[in-house]
Image: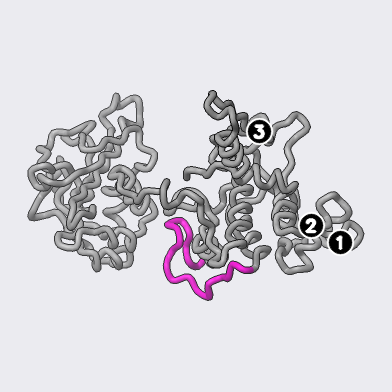
């Protein structure tokens, strides 16, 4: 996300241009509150704002340490003071066995009285444990109580957030109000949060809370944010859906006319490859039908598998999201089979995710690849093929 210029910097530029010396070259010095925080840092505005408000402080050496993890007690202080609340020292304390009269006791105990936090099953709060992403989201939604929780969550807000999880409603609420930065596909719910990360979420909550519609908006969103039209990004999103076996999401991008063809090898068979429609894809993971997906190379034996079995062997048999090489409209490696992809789909584009090999003893003969093939309809890209490839004999 492209961050907006701070108001102080905009004002400095404006008044410099109005001054009598504006015809000369004007040098503008941007005051950076911390020595290790570049103005170009993606969370600079959030950190600067919270620092200016006295909510966040740096260290004695003048650093902020944006990538350092933050614990549960530290984050509560940021949130509560970010809400404009300073609990009294003499009123709040001794609310958990491990929260007595420490510096953070007033924040933790105030939050407990308000019902914003609970302890663990053993009765402790564990204030020095690092806070993870879903804990952060829950605290934000609880303390900024204008962000209403949905009664139910019908679909996954992220591919790695199951709707049965306790935090699904909190995540959906945070997503609805644009409080979460980063990918719109993956949340990584148990990732431990950094000082920069919690600064951004707190800042967004404060800014959204000041808006009538309670949605955080970056000042330059209409100018700086372009629609996702990068083909490689569309393909990576599709790969992430496959990684999490989110077939509802795959169904949404399946070609409405031709469906999605699944090819176990580089030679596409118009007779034996299985083609699934969008409606079939929505239910395919619960379908126990054994299908013939073609023939095993070498033995010629039929590939008789359920979809889930086929998925494990011929779709996501390796971690292709982290492949060695990603190539757009190019093939890194090929086996002995005749490759006819461009003949079958002459107007399509594709991305290959390629691993050069896994066991050094095989000298690259155990390479593997997954190709996602897309075609356009009415200007939009749709998935038409999922092709597995590996060394064949």
What is the residue that sits farthest to the right in this orientation?
A: 90
Which mark's residue is nearer the viewer, 3 or 2?
3
Q: Indicate which disc residue 266 carries.
A: none
Q: What is the span of residues highlighted in magenta in the rendered image? A: 146-167
Which mark's residue is nearer the viewer, 3 or 1?
3
Where does the image place residue 235, in percent across and percent down from the top left? 30, 47
Q: Is residue 150 magenta?
A: yes
Say if mark 2 contacts mark 1, CB within 8 Å: yes
Which element is circle 3 on? loop
Q: Is residue 209 above or below residue 2?
A: below
Q: Is residue 237 above or below residue 331?
A: below
The residue where tag 1 is placed is 92
Q: Residues within 10 Å of mark 1 (few under 14, many from 20)?
A: many
N-terminal-most mark, 2 or 1: 1
The residue where tag 3 is placed is 31
Tell me what residue is drawn at x 65 percent, y 60 percent: 139
Q: Is residue 71 above or below residue 113?
A: above
N-terminal-most mark, 3 or 1: 3
Q: Is residue 389 magenta?
A: no
The residue where tag 2 is placed is 107
Give the colour scheme shown: one colour
Q: Main secondary structure of the magenta part?
A: loop
Q: Residues within 10 Å of mark 3 (few under 14, many from 20)?
A: few
Judge left or right: residue 33 versus residue 98.
left
Tell me what residue is drawn at x 77 percent, y 59 percent: 85
Residue 382 appears in the picture as rendered? no
Query: What is the C-alpha distance between the residues marked 2 and 1?
Result: 8 Å
């Amino acid at each position: 996300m492209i961050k907006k210029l701070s108001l102080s910097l905009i004002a400095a530029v404006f008044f410099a241009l109005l001054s009598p010396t504006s015809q000369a070259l004007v040098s503008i010095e941007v005051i950076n509150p911390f020595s290790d925080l570049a103005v170009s840092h993606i969370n600079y505005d959030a950190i600067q704002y919270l620092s200016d408000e006295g909510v966040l402080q740096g260290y004695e050496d003048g650093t902020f340490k944006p990538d350092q993890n933050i614990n549960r007690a530290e984050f509560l202080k940021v949130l509560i003071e970010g809400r404009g609340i300073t609990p009294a020292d003499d009123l709040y304390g001794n609310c958990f066995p491990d929260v007595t009269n420490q510096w953070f006791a007033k924040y933790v105990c105030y939050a407990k009285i308000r019902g914003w936090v609970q302890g663990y099953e053993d009765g402790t709060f564990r204030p020095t444990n690092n806070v993870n992403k879903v804990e952060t989201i829950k605290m934000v939604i609880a303390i900024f109580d204008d962000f209403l929780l949905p009664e139910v969550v019908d679909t996954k807000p992220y591919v790695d957030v199951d709707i049965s999880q306790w935090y699904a409603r909190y995540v959906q609420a945070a997503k609805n109000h644009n409080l979460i930065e980063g990918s719109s596909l993956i949340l990584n719910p148990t990732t431990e949060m950094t000082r920069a990360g919690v600064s951004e979420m707190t800042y967004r909550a404060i800014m959204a809370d000041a808006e009538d519609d309670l949605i955080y908006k970056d000042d330059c969103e209409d100018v700086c944010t372009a629609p996702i039209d990068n083909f490689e990004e569309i393909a990576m999103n599709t790969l992430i859906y496959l990684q999490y076996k989110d077939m509802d999401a795959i169904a949404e991008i399946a070609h409405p006319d031709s469906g999605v063809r699944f090819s176990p090898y580089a030679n596409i068979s118009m007779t034996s490859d299985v083609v699934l429609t969008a409606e079939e894809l929505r239910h395919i993971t619960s379908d126990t039908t054994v299908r013939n997906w073609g023939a095993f190379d070498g033995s010629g034996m039929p590939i008789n598998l359920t979809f889930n079995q086929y998925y494990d062997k011929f779709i996501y048999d390796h971690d292709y999201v982290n492949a060695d090489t990603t190539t757009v409209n190019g093939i890194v490696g090929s086996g002995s089979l005749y490759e006819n992809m461009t003949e079958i789909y002459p107007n399509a584009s594709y991305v290959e995710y390629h691993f050069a090999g896994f066991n050094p003893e095989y000298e690259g003969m155990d390479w593997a690849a997954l190709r996602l093939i897309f075609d356009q309809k009415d200007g939009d890209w749709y998935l038409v093929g999922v092709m597995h490839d590996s060394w064949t004999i």
